[in-house]
């Protein structure tokens, strides 16, 4: 008998077969709070648990840590066999099938057709086919070959007398003398009477004022002649403004553009005149472009 008592008294571990029978009944997760994964096995097995050992010295009791021991043989229960088979089936599904290169037929040699070399004595114009063009009906009627020719534009030089001046205009169509036509005006349109019309060469066309737009209608010609009464009243109004401003000039006549966008006054003066105040008053009265032209 030793002088000192043993500090730890071992307690016999619980029966392993009884623990394994409980694991089959309740499952491995609920059989014991501790489990051990044995080496080489893909499943959980219950661990051998050594019961608590109490100390003989001191106040109270102190449990010893558990001892882990791996099982000697794997579990052969129905659940573990099913788990092993499921894992083996997953690995069999993940097997990679090697790629087999399909066999292809060997390339066949390409045979080129026999190409005839051109004869150097024959010209290229004789070998290339020429496209045949059919002559038009008008060319056949006139006895020509049917080949199309570029149309030369025809132009006319027209002398037109407007209300305030006379000018040369270009026209693409012929007009008769004493006919009223629309021409390009100063930032608008004007109407005038044709004095003469001559056909000219487009390459040697003279310098003109503008172009003839179209022929005037009867109602438009009547409106053109009715401007004379308004022009007389414009002369009286302008002369009264000149006297109020004490300007040294005499207004003789006035001329409206047909679209009433421009009003020209013809005056006579011996010296240079400052028209700034007069032009301001005339614009406030007629609301159009005012042009002062001196008579020689």
Image: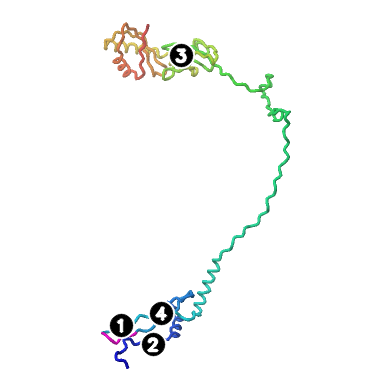
Task: For marks 2 and 1, give the CA distance.
Answer: 17 Å
Q: How are the colours assigned in the image?
A: rainbow
Depth check: 70 or 26 in front? 70
Task: For marks 2 and 4, give the CA distance.
Answer: 15 Å
Label 2: which secondary element: loop
Q: Earlier in the sequence, mark 3 or mark 1?
A: 1
Q: Is residue 55 inside the magenta stretch?
A: yes
Rendered position, 44 above or below 236 = below
Apparent side of residue 23 relative to residue 284 in the rendered image (left or right): right
The tally of labels here is 4
Residue span colored magenta: 53-58
Q: Residue 66, percent across and down?
A: 37, 80
Q: Earlier in the sequence, mark 3 or mark 4?
A: 4
Which quadrant of the figure has residue 268? Answer: top left
Rendered position, 123 above or below 237 = below
Q: Which residue is mark 3?
A: 192
Q: Earlier in the sequence, mark 2 or mark 4?
A: 2
Give the label, 3 or 4, closer to the camera: 4
Marks 2 and 3 close (CB-CB < 8 Å):
no
Depth check: 239 or 198 in front? 198
Label 4: which secondary element: loop
Q: Earlier in the sequence, mark 2 or mark 1?
A: 2
Q: Which residue is mark 4?
A: 68
Q: Which residue is mark 1?
A: 62
């Amino acid at each position: 008998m030793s002088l000192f008592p043993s500090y730890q008294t071992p307690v016999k571990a619980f029966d392993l077969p009884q623990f394994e029978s409980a694991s089959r009944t309740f499952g491995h997760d609920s059989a014991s709070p501790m489990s051990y994964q044995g080496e080489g096995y893909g499943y959980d097995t219950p661990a051998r648990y050594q019961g608590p050992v109490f100390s003989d010295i001191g106040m109270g009791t102190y449990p010893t840590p558990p001892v882990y021991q791996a099982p000697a043989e794997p579990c052969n229960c129905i659940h573990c066999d099913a788990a092993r088979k499921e894992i083996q089936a997953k690995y069999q599904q993940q097997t990679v099938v090697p790629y087999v290169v399909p066999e292809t037929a060997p390339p066949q040699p390409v045979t080129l057709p026999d190409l005839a070399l051109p004869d150097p004595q024959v010209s290229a114009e004789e070998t290339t086919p020429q496209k045949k063009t059919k002559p038009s009906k008008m060319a056949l009627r006139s006895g020509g070959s049917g080949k199309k020719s570029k149309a030369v534009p025809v132009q006319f030089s027209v002398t037109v007398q407007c209300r305030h001046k006379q000018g040369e205009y270009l026209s693409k169509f012929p007009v008769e003398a004493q006919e009223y036509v629309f021409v390009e005006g100063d930032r608008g349109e004007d109407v005038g009477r044709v004095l003469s019309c001559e056909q000219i060469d487009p390459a040697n066309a003279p310098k003109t004022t503008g172009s003839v737009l179209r022929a005037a209608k009867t109602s438009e010609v009547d409106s053109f002649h009715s401007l004379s009464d308004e022009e007389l009243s414009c002369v009286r109004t302008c002369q009264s403004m000149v006297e109020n401003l004490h300007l040294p000039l005499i207004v003789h006549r006035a001329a409206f553009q047909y679209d009433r966008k421009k009003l020209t006054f013809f005056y006579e003066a011996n010296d240079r005149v400052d028209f700034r105040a007069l032009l301001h008053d005339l614009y406030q009265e007629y609301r159009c472009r005012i042009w002062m032209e001196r008579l020689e």
